[in-house]
Image (cartoon, helix red, strand yellow):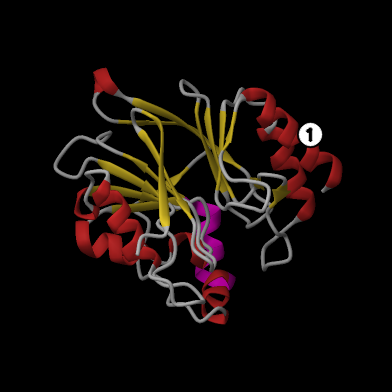
Amino acid sequence: MIYHNSVKLAEYFYCYVWQGRGNNCNAILWPSVLRGERPHVLVDPGHVRNELGEPCFDSLTQAMERDGFKMEDIGLVIGTHSHPDHIEATELVVEKSGALFTLSREEDEFYRTMGKMFFQAFGGKPPQVNPFFYLKEGDLSLGAKNDKVAVKVLFTPGHSPGSISLYLEEDKILISGDVVFAGSIGRTDFPGGSSSLLRKSIDELSQLDVEYLVPGHSTETGSIIAGKDKVRHNFYTVKMFF
């Protein structure tokens, strides 16, 4: 059974929205943006299996194959942060494809200390994968010279110490990780969380020109938010009530 719903927002942007009963994140695929034999970029592969035993990784693999993409063709895995429901399956992706892995230095430092204990507290197996490089705030260009996908990496701590968000300015798509959701915000009561930093991060993201807000999880009020007015209203709501 496939628990992911595929949503294509742009030529190089697929969101695999998690629709199972248990916890897992939404995954993002940027297909055919890298040079070489493994041209796909995967953001937040999610759980292997969640607390209800749902086969999250197998579901994502099948959903991608339904769209014509193979896990073996992933060349880079990006983690918005190091919580189990976002990066547990990274090791399986790397085993299948030899992909490189990246996240922020601050998040890697957290993961190697409190983060691994957080993994184990939820009964997960921390992936044994080292970052090939660290993401820094600023521009990240993927692809060949004449056909690059430009991504802005934004440092947005609060839910975790080194959380990042990703902004595709040309397509006006914001990947917010677990910073802000439809009608809600990320938790700060986990190890490394900070409500003051999260408020600051949300305020900074709200200044962007966004047509599609793609959060790390769906909520009761929705998932992907489409339309500038709806995105703006969502930021207004979460800043007012949270």
User: Whole-percent x and y of residue 48?
Assistant: 39, 69
The furthest residue to the top: 146
Q: Residue at x 54, y 57 (%)?
A: 107
> What quarter of the picture does the N terminus occupy?
bottom left
User: Whole-percent x and y of residue 135?
Assistant: 46, 44
Provide the residue designation for mark 1.
236
Q: Which residue is at the front of the view, 170 or 79?
A: 170
Q: Residue at x 55, y 45 (%)?
A: 164
**Disc 1 element:** helix
Task: Establish if 151 lies above or below 96.
Answer: above
Q: Amino acid at mark 1?
A: Tyr
Is 136 placed left or right of 193 in the picture?
A: left
Is 194 placed left or right of 95 in the picture?
A: right
The furthest residue to the front: 1
Judged by its main secondary structure, the magenta piece is: helix
Q: Residue at x 34, y 28 (%)?
A: 11
Q: Which residue is at the front of the view, 89 or 63?
A: 63
Task: Establish if 34 lies above or below 119.
Answer: above
User: Whole-percent x and y of residue 69?
Assistant: 23, 46
| Residue 6 occupies quadrant | top left
Is 140 placed left or right of 123 in the picture?
A: left
Q: Which residues are magenta?
A: 104-114
Q: Is residue 143 magenta?
A: no
